[in-house]
Amino acid sequence: MSKAEGNVGTEARSNLLPLYLKNRRVGKVHSKFNNGLNVQFDDVLIYVGCSGTPLSPFGLNIEEEKLKAILRSVQIDQMVVHKEKSLIFYSIDGTINIYYKNFKVMDLRLPKTKCSMAGIVVSPLYKYLGNMEFEKLVGIPLDERADRYIKMLLNSDKSDWTVNVAIIRFFTGRGKGLTPSGDDILLGFTMAIIRFGNFNIWRQVLMLEVNGDKTTTISVAYLQALLQGYVNELLIQLVKLLDHAEPADVEKTIKKVQSFGHTSGNDTLFGFLLGLEFLANQGEG
């Protein structure tokens, strides 16, 4: 994962974290990776990552050495206690305490943009995304069946409950990985459109259909954070590009997003492009 500019070496936490941890006391280690781990408290995940990497919407970043010590010591399902602005990890080697009260608080709410729907098609971001060969980059085959649902995504009335259910059911859980490609496409699409409208029916169907019975807990966590208006640090940078006119900066940020996961970055970018195309079509109407 690439370093996040402006956050290198800084212990930081998302401004969504207090809401997620309020009244939650006992959790467990949910999943471990090379550069971080998820802790589960009831129905929410908290991601503990490394300082200098993009901050998760439901996460905090700690010093590299402390993170390595935690990853060495803890196992899946071991207890984690939240107490007095601390996460306390219990392992056979003893306890490790993350006291996050004084961490830098980062605002990971989706930023507002000045770009109008009519202005989307002339933005350098839209043009760059439109020239990417996503059929070679995304994690699901863009075959005839997928093409049918992509066209529905682009052209359907997002207040039509039945059609929304059909679209979301097709994409949810489709593909491999910690966040299946179809979920990332939905995330990118939704991230684009909710900057320009409420789309309440679409959001309600997402909330109901994207659940732990149909996809991974991690995917559900990212979609739930988005529906509350929060995304990871890299995607904040991406959305801000709608108001940015420098093609070199567009390319630099897109390359960073592409480095996220195996195909997750490209899947999210593809969904974001589809969302912008949907909005551009609305602007022409």
Image (spheres, helix red, strand yellow):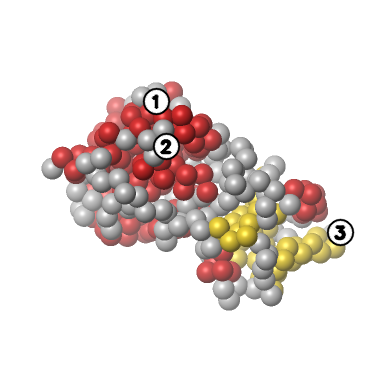
Q: Secondary structure at mark 3?
A: loop
Compute the Cα span from label 3 to label 2: 42 Å
Q: Earlier in the sequence, mark 1 or mark 2?
A: 1
Q: Secondary structure at mark 2?
A: helix
Q: Secondary structure at mark 1?
A: loop
Task: Estimate the x, y position of residue 126 in percent, counting from the top left.
Answer: 33, 34
Number of numbered discs present?
A: 3
CB atoms of marks 1 and 2 within 8 Å = yes
For the residue pair 14 and 151, the one nearer the viewer reads as 14
Residue bearing the label numbered 3: 93
Q: Residue at x 70, y 68 (%)?
A: 86
Q: Earlier in the sequence, mark 3 or mark 1?
A: 3
Query: In the rendered view, would you say 229 is above or below 3?
Result: below
Kind of residue at badge 3: Asp
Circle 3: is it few (<14), some (14-19), or many (20+) Cα within 10 Å?
Answer: few
User: In the image, is 7 to the left or to the right of 70?
Assistant: left
User: In the image, is 55 to the left or to the right of 120?
Assistant: right
Which quarter of the image is occupied by the N terminus?
Answer: top right
From the image, state whether disc 3 or disc 1 is nearer to you: 1
Which quarter of the image is occupied by the C terminus?
Answer: top left
Task: Estimate the x, y position of residue 159 in percent, counting from the top left.
Answer: 21, 55
Task: Estimate the x, y position of residue 104 in percent, counting from the top left.
Answer: 62, 60
Q: Earlier in the sequence, mark 3 or mark 2?
A: 3
For the residue pair 8 and 49, the one nearer the viewer reads as 8
Kind of residue at badge 2: Leu
Q: Residue at x 26, y 46 (%)?
A: 116
Kind of residue at badge 1: Met
Residue bearing the label numbered 2: 269
